[in-house]
Amino acid sequence: MESKPLTGPRLAGGTLQVFVAEALVLPTGFLTAAFLTRRLGPEGYGLLALASSLIAWLEWSLASILARAVVKFVAEADDWRPVATASLRAHFGLGLALAALVWLVAPAAAAVLGEPALAGYLRLFALDLPLFSLAHAHRQVLTGRGDFGGRALAAGARWVTRLFVVVLLVSLGLAVEGAILGSVTASAVELVLARRRAPIPWRRGGAPFAARRLWGFALPIVLMALSLRLFDKLDLFVLKARGATAAEAGLYGAAQNLAWLPGLFALSFSPLLLATLTRLRREGDRAGAARLARQALRGALWLLPPAALVVGGAPDLLRLAYGPAFAASAIVLGPLVLGGVALVLVSVSTAILTAGGRPELTFALTGPLVPLALAGVWLVAPRGGLLGAALVSGALALVSAGVCLWAVAREWGVRPARATAARVALLTAGAFAFGLWPTPGLWLLPKLAAGIGALVPAALALGELAPAELAWLRQRLGAALRPEQGQAVVPAKTDG
């Protein structure tokens, strides 16, 4: 399968496909978490949260190290295979090396966190590192080639497989080990499906591609990715190191799981945005690239109203998803979700900067997050507890988002419109107020659906969403499963 031309409509259709696939983590993740929290309890789930958070940080760091460089070079190349082979070899080597490192340091990590049982869980989870890394090497190539359907298929299969295998193994009595093996199996399934769509050769062939060129471009992006991934879970580990119990770690980890929901948009959209902007600039359409970048920032801001709806209904949502024992997590969900939306803006902004050939700015803008978070949570945790840690993380994410938006405005001349920001703020306040309405049990689900559904007519009434845009959105939703059709032009939205 050859690379497909990337256009605004194909970006929208591809984003919808990938978003729907990645959004399967919502029903499957809720079902998995609801099952595990009830079977393992706060302490057992806390140990799983610690192990999975550490491995997830390593895995997403691996996935992010070369992701944007690979997508950019594949999108620019006439022959994608040499770039893909260099990426595949690098990912496999890094995955094996990290797996060996985790195996060696697991006892020491467990001792630092005061949980001896954690060592065995970490060693078992290490099996997932090379599989996950190889799967994401293929994902990046699929994105660069424009095969968004292939990427969506592999991602969707991962989440569905994880749910069924985890439930099966834990029901058979494997407890935490069963949950870990479910994740390992899901990575293997994703790798098989992604490789069928992108059969990357293991041996070099065709025109040579110097791996040092890949690493040279990627180095600042690597440092940025490591900073963001470490920042993402640093507060949980600092809390534990400062004396939090396994049960408190479980409460905080449960809130982090919900706060990660805005990241689905970044996970689905940012790589596709990078590939599309790279192609547009390569073809000389800088005006089209700037217009698309502006719309991308606008779309990221629109995550705030649904996020506020979730925060407003946090106590009922946590009881429904995790059980009554986790209702206390609601107090930290607000700052964590706000920080999650801010990190989406960071992800979109750094993708725009990378497409513009300024990867060195990405680490300069995000690098300070880790030392500031480490110092802040370390100082606040003893007295501020879970809420103090969440407030530090959320505030730092907001500052980082503001700095990244400033950099995009300086480099691209692109910024969210003030009128859009005002409308989004108004709808965010309304969504939060609606979320506060107490709705116990399963009645919460139709309330959330009604609240999210009301955002579209509200946006139309405020003039933020034009009728032409709504018609175009309906067309793209209908064409999400057949992106080669319906090459409509993205309707322009004025900055007023």
Image: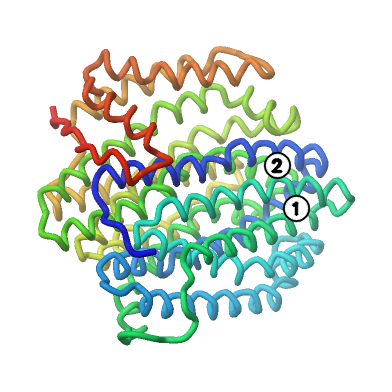
> Left or right: where does residue 38 sit relative to residue 408?
right
Percent from the top left, x then y, of residue 66? Answer: 40, 70
Which is more toward the observer, 352 or 329? 352
Q: Is residue 42 above or below residue 80?
A: above
Percent from the top left, x then y, of residue 300? Answer: 33, 39
Q: Which residue is mark 1?
A: 179
Residue at disc 2, secondary structure: helix
Residue that appears at 43% across and 41% down: 481
Disc 1 residue type (three-letter): Ala
Residue that appears at 16% across and 59% down: 281
Q: Which residue is mark 2?
A: 32
Q: Is residue 88 above or below residue 303?
A: below
Which is more toward the observer, 98 or 7? 7
Work out whether residue 394 can be spotted. no
Disc 2 residue type (three-letter): Thr
> Left or right: where does residue 385 sit relative to residue 308?
right
Q: Earlier in the sequence, mark 1 or mark 2?
A: 2
Q: How is the image coloured?
A: rainbow
Quarter of the figure with the N terminus: bottom left
Q: Are marks 1 and 2 in contact (CB under 8 Å)?
A: yes
Which is more toward the observer, 47 or 139? 139
Percent from the top left, x then y, of residue 37? Answer: 76, 40
Which is more toward the observer, 82 or 289? 82
Quarter of the figure with the C terminus: top left
Percent from the top left, x then y, of residue 359? Answer: 27, 66
Residue that appears at 64% across and 40% down: 28
Q: Is residue 64 above or below residue 248?
A: below
